[in-house]
Image: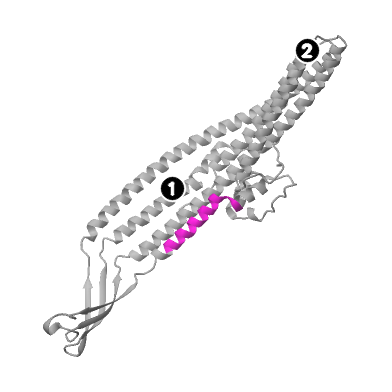
Amino acid sequence: MNLRCLMVLALVGTCAAIPLARAAEPLRLEQAVARALANNPLLAAESAQLRATEARARREGLATPYVISGSLENVAGTGALGGIRSAESTLQIGRVFELGGKRAARQALGDAEISQQRILAETAHIDIVSRTTARFIEVIADQQRLAYAEERIKQAELSRREIARWVAAARDPEFHLRAAEIAVIDAELQREHAEHELASARMTLAASWGALTPDFEAVVGDLESLPDVEPFEILAARLPMTAEQRASLLEAETITARRRLATASAKPDMTLSLGVRRLEALDDQGLMMSLSIPLGSRSRASHSIAEADAQLDAVEARRNAMRFERHQALFEKYQELNHARTEVEALRTRMLPRAEQAVAFTNKGFMAGRFSFYSLAQAQKTLFELRERDVEAAARYHTLLVEVERLTAVATEATP
């Protein structure tokens, strides 16, 4: 399964339905991605932040509340105002009536903030898929490196035993045996290095889904095949539609919504109250009404509008800078990707076959006594180094392909 398919699964939310691998079974890439998407704390944080944004938008979109108030005047005074004989009690209900479309502007702002948070969550999904895939590739590569290290030890042991037999028969000098023993020790050190590199890679992969220790023994995947990559022009054409670009556009939409709210706030609101006043001295009551309008709303709004305009300029400048940077980054990754493919193909079709032939030829001559141990050791070393280089180049190709897919991952929703 390639990364683009995994990203589609991640964004539509079907990866969670993939059964998780048992500890005794090799872990597959789609299973690793499913675990990461289901349990990664960063995704949980983005989901919680989205819920918080939605709750805030609902709260800010409510109409202004009614306010009930009461007052009691002219009580417990002196003279004619002593006691409650001259008391005046008032009960009233009031409300702020918003003018200029402020509520609609707040609702539009809430919708923009929700859309912005959703694209941030989508970007986090893409990052988790890419990161988990890259870590998975590293585990596959380290497993192969360990397998080559084990094979190298076997070859070194065979050579050491053969040299020991020849030294015992006085056919080879003693220092050849010491060199063969050093080769065995060096191979064992290479295996130890491969073992701890694999352990670290497994731990890093398990951290993708929040595990403190790996709950799998091995992973299964294919580094041999090199998936084709689309032409650069097609990949570059996706850049304006990526999640990052859409996030920038939605940020501008949010700021524009704030600007509309600031424009609406230039028109002052009106606070209207209606109530009943009781006059104890006259044993009568009467209706009352109050109206208030704040002053200075336009000047306050002008500062908020200027702030929003400056923020829009900043977002536009950052988006332009990001467009150039992403295009350059994509071109660089694309060139490295093609170079990695060229290197793998050269290793597999031209270099490794010759190295294998050289080992077979040298080993035959060594067994016949025509070549020294040093010639065989050098031929074997060259072969193993080329094998490790092949693993490194193949892993680099797949990792670069992951990065290219991440850079060009198109947002699932239409760009505004």
Left or right of 44: which side holds 388?
Answer: right
Instruction: Identify the residue at horizontal 46%, vertical 49% (top origin).
Output: 247
Which residue sits at x=67%, y=49%?
A: 31
Tell me if residue 340 can be seen. Answer: yes
Q: Residue furthest right?
A: 169
| Residue 363 sits in quarter | top right
User: How would you rate the neighbour count of disc 2 (Cα within 10 Å): few for under 14, some for 14-19, many for 20 or more?
Assistant: some
Q: How many marks?
A: 2
Can residue 226 be seen from the camera position used here?
no
Please name the amino acid that badge 1 sits on: Ser
CA distance separating discs 1 and 2? 67 Å
Badge 1 marks a residue whose secondary structure is helix
Q: Nearer the viewer, mark 1 or mark 2?
A: 2
- Residue type, mark 2 in image: His
State whether the magenta stretch is mostly helix, strand or loop.
helix
Q: Mark 1 vs mark 2: which is more N-terminal?
A: 2
Where does label 2 land, which residue?
Answer: 176
| Whole-percent x, y for residue 24 in the image | 75, 47
Q: Residues within 10 Å of mark 1 (few under 14, many from 20)?
A: some
- Return the residue at label 1: 248
| Residue toward you, 302 or 277 | 277
Specify start and end residues of the magenta stretch as a single range. Answer: 38-57
Is residue 278 inside the magenta stretch? Answer: no
Q: Position of residue 270 (x, y in %)?
A: 25, 70
Q: Which mark is residue 384?
A: none
Circle 1/circle 2 CB separation < 8 Å? no
| Image quadrant assignment for residue 404 | top right
Residue 331 lies, in percent from the top left, at 52, 34
Q: The residue tagged with tag 2: helix, strand or loop?
A: helix
